[in-house]
Amino acid sequence: MDDTKSEVNDETRRYASAEPGRRSHREFRADWIGEIARNVLEGRSLQQIIDYTVAELSSHFPDFRSAYSTVDENGTLAVLSSVEPHGMPALRGLRADLTHAPDYLRALRSGTPLAVSDVEQEPIMVPLVDSMKAGKTRALLDVPVTHSSILAGLLCLDSPHPHRWSSDEITTLQEIADALTLAIQAERSRTALKERENRLRAFVRAMPDLNFVIDENGRVLEILTHEHHLLHRDPDQLRGAYLQSALPAEVADLILDAIRRCIDSSTLQRVEFSLDVPAGHRWFEARTTPTEGEADGPRQVLMVARDVTERIESEQRVASLLREQELLLRETHHRIKNNMSTIGSLLNLQSSRIDTPECSEVLRDAAGRVQSMMVLYDRLYRSELRRRLSLREYLPPLVEEIVELFRDLKQVRTELDLPEVELSPKVLSPLGIILNELITNSIKHAFIDVEDPVIRISVTADEAEITVVYVDNGDAEARSMDVEQRESFGMQLIQVLVEQILGEVTVRRDRGSPPRMRETVIRFPRQ
């Protein structure tokens, strides 16, 4: 193959020397290349430029067929344009698989011109001889057109007769091929830019946001949005305008302050504001981030504003419902307390009208329980918005209020040892009622002859269990409630409530010399 190329080149030089008139094509190359450049600058399509180039080649080489073809990465050749002399068939639209001629394809991909004076004598053309004969091609000149060092196409001259290609012909095609390379680069750049623009437009259309480029002085430089009904003014009126003149003063000042903080700190800034727009009164959340502007011009930010009206209105509705719920709960709790107070008063009234001491005592005990439960209920209600409450916060005031109910009977001291343990109201409520029963029983029955009555409540806790120890210095034999007295209503109530918190209760009594004290121990799992 190298010998064949050397022969062709020698013959080409002799041919060029014998016919100096061929060098006249040199005069047209600058015009061709200049015209191709003008077509590129004018935005002509690549196909238009190729058709022009092939037509010009044909006019300057009328004895040859001029053609331009693409060659893809799979080795498939496709003729995009062709002009042929009389007697040669048209090739436009022809497709051929060059992988059957690997040496020919390899030579094209090398990027150097391929001049074949006789296809029947060129070894690399053997696999294509039959198709060449069908197309009446006896000699050919192929000049590769590359892009990014990859074969993109071929600029070709075909002869129906054997022909030794001159250096003028080779140089002409080479220079035109170089110009086409620039055209291909420009076309692909335009295509890539157009694709990016189309993607950007599609992105903007899909986004529910308003996108602005604003300089540090508040001048709106660019608007990108498809949601024109959310703009305070028409885009053409906003573009180039200053926020101070285009928006209400309070909104403009709010945004300008966010822009300046964004530029000064180089960090994202958020701001919320409301505006009257064609879509109605809307709320917006705007985010500003620094961007690079012109080196010698005002600094710029990108501001993305999103319509958050639905969120704001939902939050306002929720807040309103919560306020209404709070008012209803307050009214409900107030009525419950009033009803409990009424029940206690009725029980006390009924107790005073009964002559039987036993019945009267039972009614007074019931009235006392209602009163104590009312105190407990009020304490829980005050902390109802909290899911968990500390024992140190909950029990001391509760115990004091229960003891205060019996100040007319006894002045009782309380000693509490409580850890910082948080429990849920569903545990604290039964525990409060249990302590109410124990305290009530101690004051009414255990401290009859005790000069300095004391109630001690201590709580210990580990990861799994909580232990409550209740003890007083009253007489264990004098009290009415005992673990052995299962028929006692108070003890039955305590048993039910302890089971409710999945615990157990035990009572230990000191049966020695006075004072004979009793200790109540309640254990339940930590919940």
Image (spheres, grey):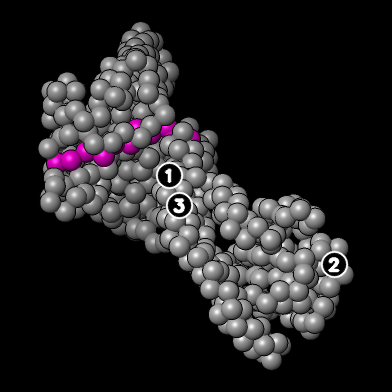
Question: Is 3 on the left or on the right of 493, as rendered?
Answer: right
Q: Residues within 10 Å of mark 1 (few under 14, many from 20)?
A: few
Residue tagged 1? 42
The picture places residue 300, in percent across and down from the top left corner, at 20, 45
Circle nearer the N terminus (2, 3): 3
Cα gap from disc 3 to disc 1, whole angstroms: 10 Å
Start-end of magenta stretch: 206-216
Q: Is residue 519 visible?
A: no
Q: Are marks 1 and 2 in contact (CB under 8 Å)?
A: no
| Amino acid type of the residue tagged 1 in the rendering | Glu
Q: Closer to us: mark 3 or mark 1?
A: 3
Question: Mark 2 falls on what kind of element?
Answer: helix
Residue tagged 3? 35
Q: Write the residue at 65% across / 65% down.
A: 156
Q: Nearer the viewer, residue 446 or 73?
A: 73
Q: Is residue 407 above or below residue 341?
A: below
Q: Is residue 213 magenta?
A: yes
Q: Which circle marks residue 133 in the picture?
A: 2
- Magenta residues: mostly which secondary structure? strand
| Amino acid type of the residue tagged 2 in the rendering | Lys
Question: Mark 1 falls on what kind of element?
Answer: loop
Cα gap from disc 2 to disc 3, whole angstroms: 35 Å
Specify the quadrant of the image occupied by residue 37.
Answer: bottom left
Question: Is 408 on the left or on the right of 131, as rendered?
Answer: left
The picture places residue 249, in percent across and down from the top left corner, at 13, 23
Q: Write the residue at 82% across / 78% down.
A: 120
| Amino acid type of the residue tagged 3 in the rendering | Glu
Circle nearer the N terminus (3, 1): 3
Q: Closer to us: mark 1 or mark 2?
A: 2
